[in-house]
Amino acid sequence: MGTDTMVRLSAFATVFVLIAVLEAVYPRRRPTVSRWRRWQANLAIIALNPLAARLVVPLLPATLAALAAQRGWGLLNLIDLPLWVEGALAVVVLDLVIYFQHVLFHAVPTLWRLHMVHHADLDIDLTTGLRFHPIEIVISTAIKLAAVAAIGAPVAAVIVFEVILNAAAMFNHSNWRLLPGVDRLVRLVVVTPDMHRVHHSVIIRETNSNYGFNLSWWDRLFGTYQAQPLKGHGAMTIGLAAFRDAQRLGLLRLLAMPFTDDPGRVPINRH
């Protein structure tokens, strides 16, 4: 196991445990369905995804970054900047790529079918942030690899970005109550749980907002920012209108969902 993998796994485990404790001690919303039932499906698909990604796309982003540096691939390998500047630029641009990727999965009905698995969760917590269909994970990995090669991102920057991306996904999907003043301050830079929760509303115009995963700037810059849900965080309904039966959202149903269920009216280009 490589050093980058050890760093990512260690960071993942630390953040997961920390946020799980904070959710238990300072919950934002009361659960509407059994956490045990949800976590069975969520943790199963989370465990399956790295295996699927490595089988289809065996090259890790950090490995590709090292290869790009050796071969001189990518913009940052063609210009001479201080390493810390290159690293910061790479992290910010990769975050922008993830924003546009997320918009794409809401805009293209075929891709939305895959992304429905993420949105069909009936409650939202840190496990929701890691619950994606394996085919979506494979496509996302391919996009990330292409971006790393095109940017010429330094190896250290790629490792840092992957750690940040996983941590941010767990943080901004968490059911952790931040004080309102803290939330207002933090969301000036980083996507907070209250900001991203709007994106998981059953109301379509709210689902199609707040696409950012880490930096909150992109939603403001591209006009997709919505500060609060219409019904408030306590009363809003999480999930998708077509999937309200928790007993029918087990692992096998989630894996089959893109191929068996109607994508509804959520995709952007249907409005």
Image (tube, grey):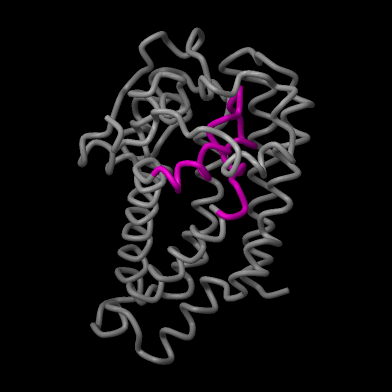
The image position of residue 65, as x and y in percent, is: 46, 78
User: Where is residue 74 shown, x and y percent of the image?
Assistant: 32, 80
The residue sitting at 50% across, 52% down in the picture is 164
Of the pair 196 and 176, the residue shown nearer to us: 196
| Residue 121 as seen in the image, left or right of residue 113 | right
Residue located 52% across and 43% down the image: 169
Residue nearer the viewer, 203 or 228: 203
Classify 164 as above or below 160. Answer: above
Residue found 23% across the figure and 83% down from its top: 79
Rendered view: 247 above or below 269:
above
Residue 257: image quadrant is: top right
Residue 55, relative to residue 222: is it above or below?
A: below
Q: Residue 182: horizontal and vertical position, in percent?
A: 41, 25
Q: Nearer the viewer, residue 156 or 210?
A: 210
Examine the structure image and report whether residue 104 is included in the region drawn in magenta. no
Judge from the rendering whether residue 269 lies leftward or rightward of residue 112; answer left or right: left
Report the residue at 26% width, 78% height from top: 81
Left or right, 192 with reference to 24: left
**Percent x, y of residue 197:** 46, 26
The magenta span reads 109-135
Query: Does residue 171 lie above or below 142 as drawn?
Result: above
| Location of the C terminus (image quadrant) | top left
Judging depth in this view, the residue of 224 and 22 nearest the camera is 224
Q: How many marks?
A: 0
Instruction: For the N terminus, give its image quadrant.
Output: bottom right
